Amino acid sequence: MTGTGEEDEELLARAALTRVLEPGDPHGGRWLREHGAAGLIRLLTDRRAVWESPPGVKPERLDGYRGRAALADPRRDLAVAAAVGGRFVCPGSPEWPTQLDDLGDERPVGLWLRGRPDLRRWALGSVAVVGARACTPYGAHMAQTLAAGLAERGWVVVSGAAFGIDGAAHRGALASGGATVAVLACGVDVAYPRGHAGLLRRIAAQGLVLGELPPGSHPTPSRFVLRNRVIAALTRGTVVVEAAHRSGSLVTARRAQRLGRFTMGVPGPATSGLSGGVHELLRGEAVLVTDADEVVELVGAIGELAPERRGPVCARDLLEPGTARVLEAVPAAGPVSAGELARACGTGTDEVIGRLYELHSLGFVERQGDAWRLGPGKEDGGAESGTVRRGGR
Amino acid sequence: MTGTGEEDEELLARAALTRVLEPGDPHGGRWLREHGAAGLIRLLTDRRAVWESPPGVKPERLDGYRGRAALADPRRDLAVAAAVGGRFVCPGSPEWPTQLDDLGDERPVGLWLRGRPDLRRWALGSVAVVGARACTPYGAHMAQTLAAGLAERGWVVVSGAAFGIDGAAHRGALASGGATVAVLACGVDVAYPRGHAGLLRRIAAQGLVLGELPPGSHPTPSRFVLRNRVIAALTRGTVVVEAAHRSGSLVTARRAQRLGRFTMGVPGPATSGLSGGVHELLRGEAVLVTDADEVVELVGAIGELAPERRGPVCARDLLEPGTARVLEAVPAAGPVSAGELARACGTGTDEVIGRLYELHSLGFVERQGDAWRLGPGKEDGGAESGTVRRGGR
């Protein structure tokens, strides 16, 4: 099929460009708009291509791009990623989270992913929980409690896998059998920080690990800063738990605000420097939150994103077979644990959790404490081709 | 002079009515509007006066009012107040703080005062600092620090003299040689709470103690609640330091908000029940503050109240002689302490502090840490009849 061939070419070109363009490269977005990914790769790699150096880019600089493009080997990168259970998604992929398009020319070229769940669906019901690396015990407690509460309510907790608040947030979600996504400033096969290697393995097994950088890439200060725009854009809202003045978490929160996402902060003692940055946010547009209910009250019901990006409206018989099997196994009578469903479906608990979150983002099921049950209006007529809340079969 | 006679009659009638009408009595304000204070006293005390029971007031209830009016002896109350250095001010008195008129029919009939300073002038540059009785050490620390900081910047700290946050706020202001006002739910000669007898004495000596209730009156739960509207209306803004959900301090803050005053809250740990009420406020319209600078930034420059109630515009030669003497003693060269000024003027430090706050509210002087200096534009031409910042001689 020609269509598939074109898609492959686009995907390969974008995978290659993740080696050529730094995250948020100021020229990359414009070039991609003007030439397309495959066109841009041709311009950068074809020695016969005559490409006038674009305004603001010195010839030496363009040589740098050409040099990286010449070395890019997307098939090898895809193979390396696949070896650790990874994949590459890009604009146009069914799994591409379209809210990243709000970043305009700073939209990632593509994302490298590890983990089974569907990123697009998970992102629809996700909240970022971020904060200081050198957090206080209070901050760690709040991040963990908040993340556990969000996960218990069926929300996906997104963070940056750093020490401190980020780690506590991921752990809180994992500990409550919930969904979590780590957005890295390095390759998804690189364990950074080293001390979080085990945590990253668990996140990749139960959730998603993703980043803009190709396999083997290491983080740099600017990559950390630019990674934050992905966290801000991917989620419905960002909660800052603890942050000193001038902290990177404030960058994420302010970016979220400019993108029209909800920005929230957890208050702390006015005497704590690590709450100073949060209080600074709260004196602006951010909303003060003290528990998961307050976060959920603000970010709204799952699937109720801004009107133009409502949750996908999808009839039950359009579900993937594996996901449909999990839905069929949820009893009309009442709640069931992920473990019981795994036994009923003859599959692993992690896989069932992933599929349950998919079903949750579509309104088919809801969480009830540690267990799951059919969503409102899903108990009757469950055997037929049901429709999600927003109707439209 | 007839005018003085009429004023005396009005003042005596209002002093008598503080024995007849409970604070915030729903009928009192209307009756006062309809009949005036002297007219209302006549209606209640003259056996020949035919007064149809007004709508919503049963005859027995009216009898209660008449009974209290018959027993009222305002001259005796004024004498009792005078014996503890007290006085009575009411609408129309030069010292009446006109911002209380914003309370409409719930405006106090009058206020009993102890202390030297001019209430009207002090109220113009005042901020309420209120909160829980059973506060935490963190809350007490914040109240004290905030009040000290406000006092150091020349602001008058108003609170309710209760244990906990209120006491810490008064003490913070006193400790920094600053101005503080206690608004009581009992007579100004009653030491309540008993444990604050010494504190109240110090406030009366260095600041002001005031209340709506006549000498000897004791507090009741409803008097505490209604006292809060006076704190809210008197001040430019209310800061709640610690308050549980459903706390009386939240009543004060919400009242301040409805009156168009600034409402502020000091954040605390989300895990602390005593910050729960404050966080509730901060999730609404209240502004998060962590230090005195942030409070002052919000409530604005002294004397810059809403346009219709700007600080009094008053030429230097209209100052009281005692106040003018203090101003003349402030050296053009630089800051001076209240103690040095007291020695220079041959008067007490408490009196000098009171007069300095008057001068401050008029823009003549400003605080600089523990000391005082001439206000901006006051250093030159100080010997002539100067005008305050807002011009208009």
Image: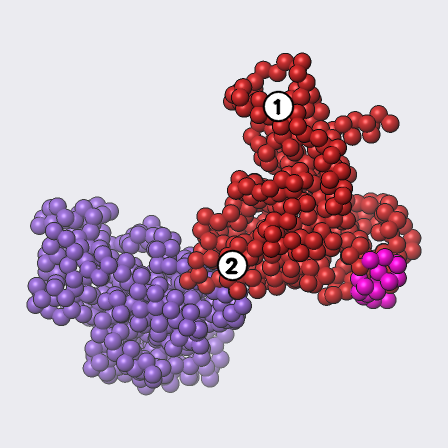
Chain colours: A purple, B red
Q: Is residue B163 left or right of residue A258?
A: right
Q: Give the mark nearest the N terminus, 2 or 1.
A: 1
Q: Is residue B2 left or right of residue A305?
A: right
Q: Which residue is mark 2?
A: B135
Q: Position of residue B162 (x, y in %)?
A: 58, 52
Which residue is located at x 61 percent, y 62 percent?
B144
Foreground disc of the pair 2, 1 = 1
Q: Residue at x 61, y 31 (%)?
A: B21
Q: Is residue B54 above or below residue B149?
A: above
Q: Kindly identify which residue carries mark 1.
A: B66
Q: Residue A254: horizontal and vertical position, in percent?
A: 47, 63
Q: Circle 1 sits in a helix, a strand or a loop, which is it?
A: helix
Asked if the magenta segment contains residue B367, the reply would be no
Q: Residue reaching furthest right? A: B383
Query: Which residue is at 42% across, 84% downward?
Result: A63
* Residue drawn 54% across the image and 19% down it: B59
Tell me which chain the residue with mark 2 is part of: B
Disc 2 + disc 1, Cβ < 8 Å: no
